[in-house]
Image: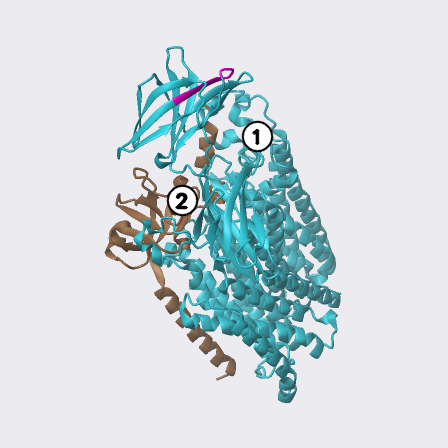
Chain colours: A cyan, B brown
Amino acid sequence: MDYIGEHLLPGKLGHFFAVLSFAASFVSVVAYFKAVGAKDTTDEKNWKRLARIAFGIDVIAVFSVFASIYYIVHAHLFEYNFAWEHSSKALSPKYLLACIWEAQEGSFLLWTMWHCVLGIILIFKAKQWEAPVMAVISFVQLFLATMIMGVYVFGIKIGNTPFALVREKFGDGPMFQRADYLKMPQMQDGQGLNALLQNYWMVIHPPVLFLGFASTIVPFAFAISGLWKKQYGNWIKPALPWTLFSACLLGTGIMMGAAWAYESLTFGGYWAWDPVENASLVPWLVIIAGLHTMVVYNATRHSLRATHLFLILGFILILYSTYLTRSGRLGDTSVHAFVGSGMELHLVLFILVFFFPAMILFIREYKNIPHIKKEENTYSREFWMFIGSLVIFLSSVFIMIATSLPVINKIAGTNWTIGDDVEFAYNRIEIFIAIILGTLTALAQYLKYKQTAKTFFFKKIWLPTAIALIIAILFSFFGGIHYDKYGTGFLAAIHLGLFCAIYSVVANAGYIWAGLNGRLKAAGASVAHVGFGLMLVGILLSSAKKEVLSHNTTGININFDPSAKQNPLENITLLKNVETDMGKYWATYINNDSVDEKTKMTYFKIRFRKKDNNEEFTLYPNWIKMTKGQQGISANPDKRHYWDRDIFSYISAADNMGEGDTTSFKSYPVAIHDTVFYSKGYMVLDKVIVNPDNEKYHFTPADTALMASITVVSRDSMRYQARPVLYIKNNEAHYIADTVFAQNLALMLGKVNDSKKIELRVRESGDMVPFVALKVYEFPQINILWFGTIIMIIGFIMSIVRRARSTT
Amino acid sequence: MKRLHIILLVFIAIAIGVLVSFMGNLSTYETIASAKQKEGKTVTIIAKLDNSQPIEYDPSKNPNYLSFHISDTLGNKARVVYYYGKPYDMEKAERIVLKGRMKGDIFEITQKDGILIKCPSKYKDDPEAAKKNLSQNQ
């Protein structure tokens, strides 16, 4: 059939470029391989030239694929499934970008695009390492290209093409029998971007995170190249800035995700040990471990073997996390993970195709990797740095195992899962990791490489130790940390952890002066460690002192459930315009306001008044009605920022959950003395009064008004009066509803029929008084976490600049 | 023996200790019937919302009490009680993952994270939902 109105060219072009990118990266891989193995320099040069051209074509192809998708989405070509499923006409351009990487294929594309950028830089900068490093990167490109190819080879579908048409994807739909199916209403607009994701974080977080993801290939490729060319260790120096870059970007991406979760989602915090969060954290930790052993090798020639292992595993874990989040395996343990898209096998292959060659190469070359027989001195920096790396690595192994339970279950046929307190399962282990790392980062800088004189070390270290101890004791005594939910043991660990974190901050800040004499250029590591220490402080304080402010102290029907007493009552009910006691605050629900119909957002105005100083402020938590054919809503929190804490609130329920006010009215035509039944009784229309003038309504004979007088009789024989009114003014009908609160009834008069019957409209609902159920948290010292993150990033950047200068 | 080897051994010992204690605290996936046999023990159930029974949640009365019924693939049913607000979109969820313990005939969930309902971002690639949208208005 010839379909009318389809634009097939952009899709054909896009698909062509997707296949071209596969072919080009294939040529590039082969040519770089040949260049590595080339016997003489002219041969090598020729192969390299070919490889560069191929890679250049790959770059052009990849960006053309992106341009095609962007065009399809931008021009609203809804015949394409990608545009139909992920975008809509209402999206502004920045969200058009967001909806591209919301999709599985789009996020693969983003990843590939960053590889292109990194590859081009490497072609110019990597010098003698170009061929082997680029061979590895081209190989990854080759594999990523298969993810979005969507071609059939021997009847097996390889990858999902982003250029599939709606009619190809849902070919059996009856609407596609029509040649002009594009004219049908459901093809006029796309499903749109999920309301939750229409957020500026969605525009910036994925590109940064994927740059972090993509950049882990570079240290991996260098490590493989070192083994491949048997030039052990030479690669460390040029690879060091790349590893720093990777650690910096991946860390930034992860923390952006945390900030997003905190800012606009209702997970009630910035970190929940959700498998998807862990899947990015684990590779980061392993890269950090590798980074430290690289620095050790650079200074002392120790730890080269461990470095290889860490950097190889760092990249493999990135692939593994791709598998975890995209295979649908995590469906039952994570709130985030993507629905599986039938690519599980493909994703497993992606891991294995890198894991086995890399590990075999590593094991085969293991004996040849030079290492120093003599042990590290206990009073040496490298010894403790290595221990620290090992601790980071072990901690990441623990997180990985815990996160991988669904995978382990599948392989081993078991059915384990983490108990009902997921966060504590991690926290009780990780607190000790924090203690060890805090201490090590504090001490290690004061040790010199190779050998430190004891007197020198103790002379330098006593002052920061003392200062940290004093600050920590002050915090412990006056900080109000009484987090005894998990017993005194855990509370003690928190206090100890707090000391270690403060120790790390003080010692590293002190080292900039005591050890480096204020030479800021060389202080990147110290600055990053100060930031890391501050992050630990912020995490410990904000978690240990996180407080639910909205404890239900109103006494409203708490006794409905006898066992509720032992349980946390985290939501408080606020009736409209009733000032309610909320612990330290009085809280009042003022009103709500639907701002614009397009975004389907409703703001709730909540006023808080502090009891002790009458400080007043207003928060506007909102919710968004879901798009994409889902019903229900999604809440967005609002916060009050103080320098030392955040007041964080969101709506957990309200009276008009996503429903209009008039939708649930039922109409009954009634004559006088007719009876209408409702669930808890019946009502009788007693009489209809024209132009009533009584204590409630004041109409004059000049008006046109009707009042129905209704008696409501409930099942328990209670009687209520209701008097809804209908009147005409300026040729328009106006309705005044009347309510019977005790029976949750709302009654309205509809039109008057000719047959002397009037229309009585009845609504029954559970919630007549407008109210919201609100949740309010206080996060103390959360800003220390964000501040620490920024400091750490600055530290990374300082180190990148310094290391990059020293390599050129 | 080198000092490093001793440290490695210590780490391995600690790691094994951590893993053993971690495994000890793991719960298991159960059916409703087997959860009933393990009354009082924390277990995880994957079930469907039983739509033949109402979801009881009246935030104007008590926003911290939610009760609903579930049925699992074997056809067993149970009532669930949860002491936090009702998760959004609960009615739409295909499957619900519940972590809690049986107390008599009631499955009680005391942790806020005890109910896991797929968050909207997961639906986005759901072909069934897309199909439904495509065939409406027909």
Give the percent coordinates (x, y) of residue A715: 26, 33
Q: Which residue is mark 1?
A: A78
Q: Which mark is residue B59?
A: 2
Same chain letter for marks 2 and 1: no
Determine the residue positioned at 52% across, 72% down.
Answer: A497
Q: At numbered mark 2, what does the secondary structure look like: helix, strand or loop?
A: loop
User: Which amino acid type is shown beneath numbered disc 1?
Assistant: Phe
Please state the extent of the stretch shown in magenta in the rendering.
A701-708
- Chain to which the residue tagged by mark 1 belongs: A
Residue type beneath disc 2: Pro
In front here: A577 or A179?
Answer: A577
Closer to the observer: label 2 or label 1? 2
| Residue B55 x %, y % | 34, 41
Characterize the local packing of mark 1: few (<14), some (14-19) or many (20 or more) Cα atoms within 10 angstroms.
many
- In the depicted structure, whether residue A775 falls above or below residue A497: above
User: Which image quarter is the C terminus of chain A in?
Assistant: bottom right
* B80 lies above or below A35: above
Q: CA distance from mark 2 to mark 1?
A: 41 Å
A327 or A267, which lies in front? Answer: A267
